[in-house]
Image (cartoon, coloured by chain):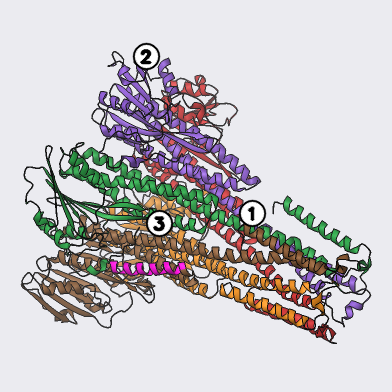
Chain colours: A red, B orange, C brown, D green, E purple
């Protein structure tokens, strides 16, 4: 996970609802896109200011206003006024780092959650906060940078594929959440590939880089898990909610998201277990290798120490050392030393110390 | 567990309910088998296409359509249309890797769970997704490859043994789930045998292969546990369900499956504990052995180092070294060295260092 | 725990309710004992077949049929027919390895749980499955081998001590469960004694046998815990049950069993903690001892290595080595070597390395 | 915790309600003290037998009979008959080692819990079982040995301080429980002091005694935690109870006890964490120190081994070794050896190995 | 966390509600500040005694009496009498070290929680107990020392910013709690910075100081977590409460505090995980480094030991050692020794032991 650099503390002391963007400035400029559609027609329009949008969605049944880039608090404020959004909701939209949640207000439903992206270079998982404000006939979506998670949904609206054009805002909200949850599967597949590569690397040569990467991935898994767990709560809240904004024909689809979320959590847990297992294997293979090295070296030293002692004995300068005068003394000592060495080697081999 | 190679991400961006088979192609061709039976009669028929089957189960009370092989999405689609199955259900049938669950729809009950098989060669547990669609007078079962888990049920229908022919679809669903849960016991018995063999191998000689196998089995146990836990939820859901499709005379039998599931979970937990214990024993015996080796070697070195020093002393070339001139100097030094060596040996023995 | 050798898999594929004894044949022959009693009278009778028993308990209020040995499925089947026991209950009675549970049927209450016995020789805990079928005026008890857990209850019935003769079947069931739970206390006391002995052995000399025994006891504790936990659920179920078979005057006594079960679980947990603590102490004392040995040995080697070097220097054969010609050169070198040795000793002592 | 020496198993086989004292005989003789009081008057009286007490509390509103010493089962039995206490309650009073619990009977409320005392010499926590039988106008308290936990309550009754004289038995029960819970705080403060001392000792010199004490305290914390956790349940049960014996004006005070119990549990948990942290610090500082020693010693050996080799080379007896004849050969070798030694030292220093 | 030096035990034996300040005397003198405000006006006044304050808040809607310094129990007692606060509440206000909680009384709501401050010098987190007594038209706040957490709220009241002047006591209570929760974010940001610095330090050079600091921070996180967890309960209790003192327009703001509390807990958990990960990295890098050092040193020793043996052999004094007489014997031995040394080096390199 990218370490959060944003400083929530700058807001400390401000009254609740004060609008300050807390988060990295991820997008150069704020962009607004409007989709107006019904079963029969679809209209698409871009703007830089809320004011540029047509005031009321005329004949269309759903107006989806998709806002990218949060640093321009003016845009958010205008949107808030126009769609009568509570200041606390606006605050949550701007302060990235929210826990995923669904909150019901009188006129709308506020849903906030995270999108995840795996950066294959750093091996880190990048997240971005996405907010949905679901009204009866409008849906506002807020994200920090232009992402492509929503692209398939846009395509489906344009081409009128599936049920999306016939159903209302609730179904659009479902489709957007589903698109984001589907991204988690892609992230997990990339993580799975990386784990497989790490597993093979471990069998070959357990280097320190491998262990660092395992530690890193494990941490990412833990952080991702902490983000996805409240997501489950969010979906359960939607299912228990009595708001007609989200319930209705989209009900069974939300149950589907719940299943997907549980699958993501299951996969996360099993990856975490796999990584813990890999770490254990790494540590034990490391200590195994170390032990082997030390054992071989110690055995070598242990064989030569008595031999050196023997050589030392016959290096002594006593006047009366009969062996020194023997004709075959030198050869005998060599024989002795070779014998001692071989016997020790044999003993060590038989005890499996070598 | 076989690593899932299927790529769920290829579906990312598709509308919900899009039918794509996610999973390995485990069976060469799709095969459809029809069983029509009532208390008095039974009729069996094979086909390659749904269209080849007789349109309506005439006099019979239960029609069991057993479909093997999921890669031919056309078959699934036709079945979906004929039995009015919801697109999300069809999607779940095709996307293997579902969590076990039971979902109630208007006309049918959808139950999905996994069968397990132990591969004694690799020591891995192979799983396969099984889906049941239980209607009032029909039951569709979907599996990836032709398995023999259902064979005993087929036999019982043919021979009219037990209650199976007199009861309806709910009881058939129970019989199929029960047959699969029974397979888990067989898998666990094989795992139990393997654990026993590992235990004996550990007492003999703790090699690295043993530890790798323990790690592997432990991982299998964890993955299996993650698959069987939602199975418990599934059965609880069936018991709490108010659908008349499954409830009724089969009620007490479902309670029986719950007991079996709990027994499987208990056995799994105890195997996991056993394996953790074996790993601890392995590690401690390994470090014990290493310590013993190092201690013996170090003791040997420590005994010879002072002896070598003594030899070194009398190897010095000083002109005035009275000992060198003594008649019994050489013998005395040998005596000294033997004494020092024996004393050290005795001390080390008395301290239990050898 | 004795490893379960029984093969549940031989039943795989049989219809539910098929009667096969799964378990070790623990008793040579099946024995049936009948107790008929009321406040005023008691009658005792033994038989080998159910048919030999008088058909209906005449004036007596409670008929307790106590069956020992399960391998003769015919006996169980006859009893099942006579007392109208559901086939699934008969199956559970025969398939040892059930989780403790209480199940209500129309005419009777089925209770299954385990008795435990500590085998002081192997240090293992032996368990045996006990089944109770509690009807309005009869109680059937099934066990695998003749045990003495029920003896005190039999005595109390014979002597008419306590309330047992005046109360009905519910109280008898309570008395039998209570007698078995009391056995757990005896088992735990024996385990407690063993832990105490292990603790003392650890303080004396931490051998590998001690660690093996600790590991073994810990495993026994975990398995026993897994067996006693569902027992708690069983008692809670009895307390929540609305069946008049067990509720009534025996109510407060069942609450008493619950307290005892909780005490057993508490003791188990604390023993498990104690054993984990002992293992930690064992491991740390082992590594402590190893460290101490290695340190002492290394210090000895480190002291002699520089001395050997000095001796080596004066063993060199250079023509011009002034020290060699000195009158007190040899003595001076000894002085140097002793000084170096003593200084090193002092330094090592002062640093607490020796 | 004092290891429980009492043998519960001697009761195995006895009918429920058999009165046997299970526990150490902690008090020489049984002592009975009677307090009779109302808002206006208070009367105090001691006795050795229940029969010696006046038969009915005349004008007074509350009669508190405080019994110390449980080994004389006759006293307990007489009290049981006089106040119509259920045999199972009497059994629980005598069998020390009960889990804290509150049980409602028709005429009275039975509360059992533990008092704790820290023994500064052994570092162990001593516990004693306290039973309260709370009737409408009487309260019986049972403890194993004369403790001073109840003294402040006695003082308050005598002096008429606080609300105690105006309120009934429920408030007296509250005051007694509160006095005992307050003792836990004192125990925890002493433990806290000891932890602080251990922390300082660890910084100074990590000896094995320190680790033994940490292990011991950790075990005490775990056992105390297991005793205080059911205490929380007890208080919750009192708060949920509908018995008018304890509810009423004392209600808010019981909520106060609950807060205190939660505080005790919190402190216990944090002490346990602290002790675990200390153990980790101890282990890592131990291995750190060991590593340092070994490293220094190995570096010394490594420096001298090449030097000894050089000396060995020039101790060889070859006839043609030109260096030996050189005028400054000896000095040159010294120079070489000093250089090699210094270079190695420098390398080791630069690599931070020394 | 500052170790609590306060001695709760001095209260042991006192009747409940006895007013003694338990805690450090953190403020020189008790200070009382009164804010009276309504939508239109605001009046501010300081005093040293409660009696100095005007008796009844005349036209104003909210009277906020802010009391700093708790050691003067007289002030608290006077306030208690004037606002009819229950003695147990007064006791809780004075006994710092309460668990955060919300308690409803007839006339007021008592809320107690902690403020946290990070001391960058010691790396410890300092906490202070804050009590709020929320009546219908008054709010009393008690803190141990003059802090600045409430300053922004005072500013907002003075300037009439936001909703604060128009809403009642419930909203003021919310604003005060919110201000304190916001401080937790500041504390966590400082901890986050420190963790980042530790992470970099670990990559550079893993010293023992780093590990001590990690251990310390981890402990702080655990203690802080234990303080913030009941805070969540507190907010849930406020949301479930039916008291009109706190519910009403402030409702949605309290839900906001709950979200913030959950975010604080999430961040705490992730910091704890990060620190555990850092500790693991530290330990493994330490043992890695140690292993590397030992391996290099052992390899050096192992290379020289055979060479020294060779030198020893030719240092022997046998009369008949043909090699010694050879013309190129010395050179040949050098060649042999260099070859042996290089071969060993090559072998060790190829095996990656160096």
Instruction: Report x, y in % for residue E84.
Output: 24, 26
Q: Is residue B328 left or right of residue A133?
A: right
Is there CB contact under 8 Å for labels 1 and 2?
A: no
Element under disc 1: helix
Image mark 1: chain? A
Q: Position of residue B333 (x, y in %)?
A: 74, 79
Task: Report x, y in % for residue A352.
Answer: 62, 75
Q: Which residues are magenta?
A: C184-203
Of tags 3 and 1, the one toward the viewer is 3
Q: Is residue E298 above or below residue E165?
A: below
Question: Which residue is label 3 attached to?
Answer: D219
**Which circle, 1 or 2, is nearer the viewer?**
2
Q: Report the residue at 52% width, 54% height from top.
A: D282
Q: Which mark is residue E42?
A: 2
Residue A41 visible in the picture: no
Q: Nearer the viewer, residue A266 or C317?
A: C317
Say if D201 sits above or below E51 in the image: below
């Amino acid at each position: 996970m990218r370490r959060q650099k944003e400083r929530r503390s700058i807001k400390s002391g401000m009254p609740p609802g004060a609008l300050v963007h807390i988060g990295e400035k991820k997008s150069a400029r704020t962009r607004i896109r409007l989709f107006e559609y019904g079963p029969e027609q679809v209209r698409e329009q871009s703007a830089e200011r809320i004011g540029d949008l047509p005031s009321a969605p005329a004949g269309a049944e759903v107006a989806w206003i998709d806002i990218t880039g949060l640093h321009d608090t003016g845009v958010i404020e205008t949107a808030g006024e126009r769609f009568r959004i509570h200041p606390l909701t606006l605050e949550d939209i701007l302060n990235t780092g929210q826990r995923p949640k669904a909150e019901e207000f009188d006129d709308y439903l506020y849903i906030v959650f995270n999108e995840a992206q795996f950066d294959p270079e750093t091996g880190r998982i990048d997240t971005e906060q996405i907010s949905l404000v679901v009204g009866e006939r409008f849906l506002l979506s807020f994200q920090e940078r232009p992402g492509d998670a929503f692209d398939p949904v846009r395509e489906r609206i344009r081409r009128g594929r599936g049920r999306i054009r016939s159903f209302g805002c609730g179904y659009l909200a479902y489709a957007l959440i589903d698109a984001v949850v589907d991204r988690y599967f892609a992230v997990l597949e990339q993580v799975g590939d990386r784990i497989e590569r790490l597993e093979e690397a471990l069998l070959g040569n357990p280097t320190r880089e491998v262990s660092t990467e395992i530690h890193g991935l494990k941490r990412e898994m833990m952080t991702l898990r902490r983000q996805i767990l409240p997501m489950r709560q969010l979906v359960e809240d939607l299912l228990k909610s009595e708001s007609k904004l989200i319930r209705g024909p989209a009900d069974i689809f939300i149950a589907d998201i719940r299943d997907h979320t549980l699958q993501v959590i299951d996969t996360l847990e099993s990856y975490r277990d796999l990584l813990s297992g890999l770490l254990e294997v790494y540590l034990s293979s490391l200590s195994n290798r170390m032990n082997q090295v030390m054992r071989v070296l110690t055995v070598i030293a242990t064989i030569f120490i008595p031999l050196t002692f023997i050589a030392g004995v016959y290096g002594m300068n006593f006047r009366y050392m009969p062996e020194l005068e023997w004709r075959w003394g030198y050869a005998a000592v060599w024989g002795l030393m070779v014998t001692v060495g071989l016997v020790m080697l044999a003993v060590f081999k038989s005890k499996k110390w070598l």
